[in-house]
Image (cartoon, rainbow, N blue to C red):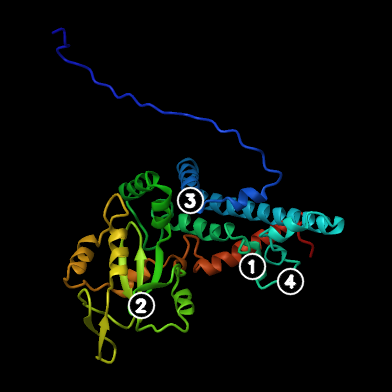
Amino acid sequence: DGAERDPNFYTVCKMKISSLSMALADDVEPIYDALDPEALAAVLFHKIALDAYMEGLVAAQETAESWLRSLMVCVYQSAQVEQAKLEEEVEKRQQIQSMMDTTFVASERLVDQEGDLAVEEVLLGRGHAKVAVVPLLVFALMQCDALRPSGGNFQPSMDARLCAIAQMASMTPGVLAKAIAPSLVLWSMKDDEAVVQSLPLSRDGIVNAMEGIDENDGILLLDSPKRIILYLADNTMRPSVKKGMSKAKNKDNDKVSINVGPNLESTLLSCLKGFRTPPASWKELESFLEGGDFEEVTSNIFHSALLEDKPTASGIRDFSEWKTEMASLIQEDLKKSGDIVT
């Protein structure tokens, strides 16, 4: 039939490319307003990983911090430009409606304006809805298994590090964001609904966010590609529970009811199906949702996921202390450029 005795096979990849003409922005503020943190996490990971390969892991950490400082200086300068434009509009009595529609608030973006935010928060972009998450994003990337330099108790093998890099490099932006900074939600077992959609990844932050909330009714749901955890808000409880109205003992040996309602169950199932590779605890969770016993999660496992409480490779105690140091460096950069006058 004319066929080759030993046929050669090859793969043909087709790519459709289209171009879209877009107007240029008059200034950078609209660019910051359109920032996608998940997409930024993916791009930044690849850039830092390349720098780690070219210059080393320690140098890559310094590159990440330098990039953050540069960005925050630019964000601050953009706020100054925006404030000058608004003042000019007021003087000319023009475009009053556009002034009313803007989301820019000078007191949250500039240190010389009175506002509710501390100087440190202003310098780290807390006053900008999209930029506010960038410092945590950079800190999370610096702490991830792929990019954190070896030291202390963290001594991954080369195979383990390369595996982490390969896995993270192939993740979608949404999954990568959860890999470096897990989602933590507080659920009410009584009402079967999320009470706080996004909790800080620190013990003190969780305690502060739960002020005024019945801790005996709350259960924490931590969602990440590595592990999905259900953890009682009252961390003195160590339950072995069943689906529905199950029993566990608290510190006084009193029985308490734990209710996993249909909404929380649906959310758990969605979490389990949300990743290409099931998290480590998927079998235990599926068994739990089918009515089996829930394997106890120790406090060490839960607290190991609290990113903001972790020390940096350079010895800084936690995210809060790291932010203070970064804010001080950003302030010095702004003083050198003349944007802040002492």
**Residue pushed farthest right?**
92
Would you say the residues marked 2 and 3 are in contact, meaning their CB atoms lie under 8 Å apart?
A: no
**Camera-side mark, 3 or 1:** 3
Badge 4 marks a residue whose secondary structure is: loop
Circle 4: residue type: Glu
- Mark 2 or mark 3: which comes first in sequence? 3
- Mark 1 or mark 2: which comes first in sequence? 1
| Residue linked to disc 2 | 191
**Image quadrant in which you'd find residue 303:** bottom left
- Mark 1 or mark 4: which comes first in sequence? 4
Badge 3 marks a residue whose secondary structure is: helix
Badge 1 marks a residue whose secondary structure is: helix
Distance between mark 4 and mark 2 Cα atoms: 40 Å
- Mark 3 or mark 4: which comes first in sequence? 3
Q: Local crowd at mark 4 within 10 Å, few (<14), some, or many (≥20)?
A: few
Badge 2 marks a residue whose secondary structure is: loop
| Residue linked to disc 3 | 41
Distance between mark 1 and mark 4 Cα atoms: 14 Å
Circle 3: residue type: Ala
- Mark 4 or mark 2: which comes first in sequence? 4
Q: Residue at x 28, y 58 (%)?
A: 272
The answer to whether residue 222 is above or below residue 234 is: above
Distance between mark 1 and mark 2 Cα atoms: 38 Å
The answer to whether residue 297 is above or below residue 2 is: below
**Camera-side mark, 4 or 2:** 2
Q: Taking 299 as reference, is 336 left or right?
A: right
| Residue linked to disc 1 | 120
| Residue linked to disc 4 | 114
Taking depth in this image into account, of 183 and 17 the one nearest to the observer is: 17
